[in-house]
Image (spheres, rainbow, N blue to C red):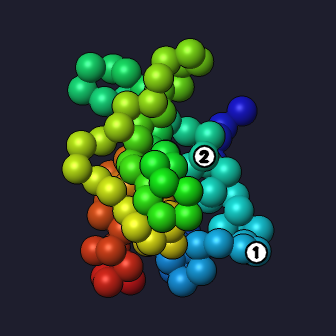
Amino acid sequence: MSRYRIDTSDLPFAREFLADPIGYHSPGLQRVLNVMRGSGIADATGDRYKYVLVVEDRHGRWRLGRLPLERGVPVELVDDIIYTDLIEAERDVFRRRWRDLTGEDLDKALSQA
């Protein structure tokens, strides 16, 4: 069974997410998010992880973390990346996951489409 892969045909869904990260999502965007939320990427050491937001101060501060796909392993906080706006944090995580899964910078791909 082959797994759905995100590619440039999904750019309209990326635009949809960046415009409104919270709330109802179209079926196409939901498919993209399911791939992003279920997938991880291997780093240079071969460890698999995915980017997540870690609440530092409820309703006020979030940190970028790398969640290992192996259960029981603690989340690794990414140095110096702190958010004070949840919407911008969600957008940044989406962009990072897009880059990890496609190898492309999302903003550059959107400007060329």
The image shows a total of numbered marks equal to 2
User: Of the residues under marks 2 and 1, which one precedes in the sequence?
Assistant: 1
Find disc 1 in the rendering and name its residue.
24
Is 23 displayed left or right of 68 in the figure?
right
C-alpha separation, residue under disc 2 versus residue under disc 1: 16 Å
At horizontal 30% and vertical 64% (from top left) the residue drawn is 105
Crowd rating for badge 2 (residues with CA inside 10 Å; few <14, some 14–19, many 20+) = some
| Secondary element type, mark 1 | loop
* Quadrant (top left, top right, bottom left, bottom right) of the N terminus: top right
Q: Quadrant of residue 85?
A: bottom left
Find disc 2 in the rendering and name its residue.
37
* Quadrant (top left, top right, bottom left, bottom right) of the C terminus: bottom left
Is 19 displayed left or right of 106 in the figure?
right
78 or 2, nearer to the observer: 78
| Secondary element type, mark 2 | helix
At horizontal 55% and vertical 39% (from top left) the residue drawn is 39
At horizontal 37% and vertical 31% (from top left) the residue drawn is 76
Residue 58 in percent (x, y) is at 55, 56
